């Protein structure tokens, strides 16, 4: 029977490496084609992104938010949507506060392809959904080449 010694520092280093791997997706910019998982507290709006021949569209769920509390930026090829969902009311009864909705600041970033026409980007906010339309440049849409005989 072999006797091995237990080293608590090895255990701590192993835990630190596992935590770094766990936190990495939450601290980096996500490509719009990569799935994203978030486990945590606070407000984290759902984002659906789809692409067709003409454009990429980001649909961000922002229920109960005022659009003045949201900022959209495109720097280089990184689209960032950030803002804050503020608590507007509390249901109180005898020192008891019940809050089930999530509130707080958020920031979501996605790497977009370089084919975006930055001068034609537009955003619309309707019924709690922010739609960001990122049109593609003409050369990115492709074209059919005729075949001559």
Image: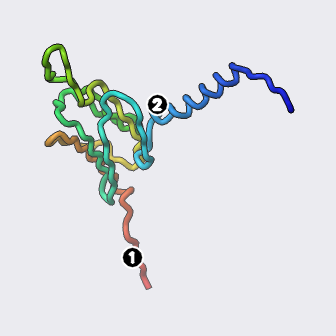
- Disc 2 and disc 1 in contact, CB within 8 angstroms: no
On the image, the x and y values in percent for residue 18 come to 58, 31
- At 38% from the left and 36% from the top, the residue drawn is 109
Q: Nearer the viewer, mark 2 or mark 1?
A: 2
Secondary structure of the residue carrying tag 1 is loop
Query: Is residue 103 shown to the viewer in this render?
Result: yes
Alpha-carbon distance for marks 2 and 1?
47 Å
Which label sits on residue 1?
none
Q: Give the residue drawn at x 48%, y 36%.
A: 25
Q: Relative to residue 38, is residue 121 drawn left or right?
A: left
Q: Quadrant of the N terminus?
A: top right
Q: What residue is at 42 percent from the left and 79 percent from the top?
A: 147
Foreground residue among 108 and 134: 108
117 or 25: nearer the viewer: 25
Q: Is residue 114 visible?
A: no
Q: In the rendered image of this protein, does residue 140 appear above or below residue 31?
A: below
For residue 96, what is the image quadrant?
top left
Residue lying furthest bottom? 149
Q: In this figure, which residue is indicated by the disc labeled 2?
A: 27
Instruction: Indicate the secondary structure of the residue bearing disc 2.
Output: helix
Placement of the C terminus among the 4 image quadrants: bottom left
Q: Is residue 34 left or right of residue 14?
A: left
Can you say whether 92 is above or below 125 in the image?
above
Q: Nearer the viewer, residue 113 or 86?
A: 86
Dividing the picture into quarters, in which one does residue 77 lie? Answer: top left
Which residue is identified by label 1?
Answer: 146
Residue 78 in percent (x, y) is at 40, 37
- As drawn, the residue found furthest toward the right would be 1
């Amino acid at each position: 029977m072999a006797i091995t010694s237990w080293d608590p520092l090895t255990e701590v280093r192993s835990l630190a490496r596992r935590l770094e791997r766990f936190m990495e997706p939450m601290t980096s910019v996500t490509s719009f084609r990569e799935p994203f998982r978030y486990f945590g507290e606070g407000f984290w709006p759902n984002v659906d992104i789809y692409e067709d021949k003409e454009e990429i569209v980001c649909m961000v769920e922002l229920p109960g938010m005022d659009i003045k509390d949201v900022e959209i930026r495109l720097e280089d090829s990184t689209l960032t949507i950030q803002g804050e969902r503020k608590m507007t009311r509390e249901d109180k009864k005898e020192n008891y506060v019940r809050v089930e909705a999530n509130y707080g600041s958020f920031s979501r970033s996605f790497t977009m392809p370089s084919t975006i026409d930055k001068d034609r980007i537009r955003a619309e906010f309707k019924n709690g959904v922010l739609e960001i339309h990122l049109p593609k440049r003409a050369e990115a849409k492709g074209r059919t080449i005729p075949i001559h005989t």
